[in-house]
Image: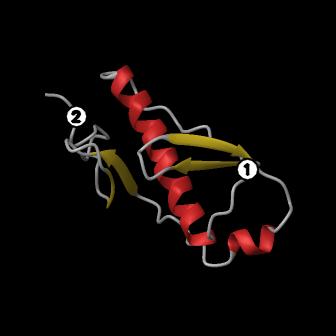
Amino acid sequence: MSRLTTTGFFRTFLLAAALTALTTSALAQAAAPTPWELKPDMGYGYDKDGKTFSYKMGTNNAGQLLKGARKVPKGTLFFIGQNGQLYMRPGPYLEGDGKFMFGTN
């Protein structure tokens, strides 16, 4: 794995996970939401050019990896804006009946 700062790595990880989920969601359109399949032994990166990558992780430098890392709050929505930029937004993002607030009409 290339050298990344811990904070940078986790930001990259979260962005890649969000991008993957959004791409899947866009393809499914009206389909029911599906859970992400993130694996504990994998790292996910979103690079400066907007490309996503996955990395097989090991136990080497695990303490360094967690140093400076932050948990993602529950109820967080990730999405790609019209400008191609990845964003995150705190909830709510579901209607009272469980439908996605920002979905198609």
Look at 61% across and 78% down and name the residue there. Answer: 68
Look at 38% across and 30% down and name the residue there. Answer: 25
The amino acid beneath tag 2 is Gly
Q: Nearer the viewer, residue 33 or 72?
A: 72
Residue 85: image tag: none
Other residues around mark 1 within 10 Å, as few (<14) / some (14–19) / many (≥20): few
The amino acid beneath tag 1 is Pro
The figure's colour scheme reads secondary structure
Look at 86% across and 63% down and name the residue there. Answer: 60
List x then y, in percent, for residue 49. 41, 46
Residue 40: image tag: 1
List x then y, in percent, for residue 77. 36, 52
Secondary structure type for disc 2: loop
Instruction: Say left or right for 72 vs 103.
Output: right
Instruction: Say left or right for 45 vs 57.
Output: left
List x then y, in percent, for residue 17. 52, 45
Q: Name the N-terminal-most of marks 1 and 2.
A: 1
CA distance for labels 1 and 2: 30 Å
- On screen, 15 above or below 61? above
Picture quadrant where residue 98 is located? top left
- On screen, 80 above or below 70? above
Picture quadrant where residue 67 is located? bottom right
Residue 103: image tag: 2
List x then y, in percent, for residue 95. 24, 45
- On screen, 7 above or below 39? below
Which part of the image, by quadrant, shows the C terminus? top left
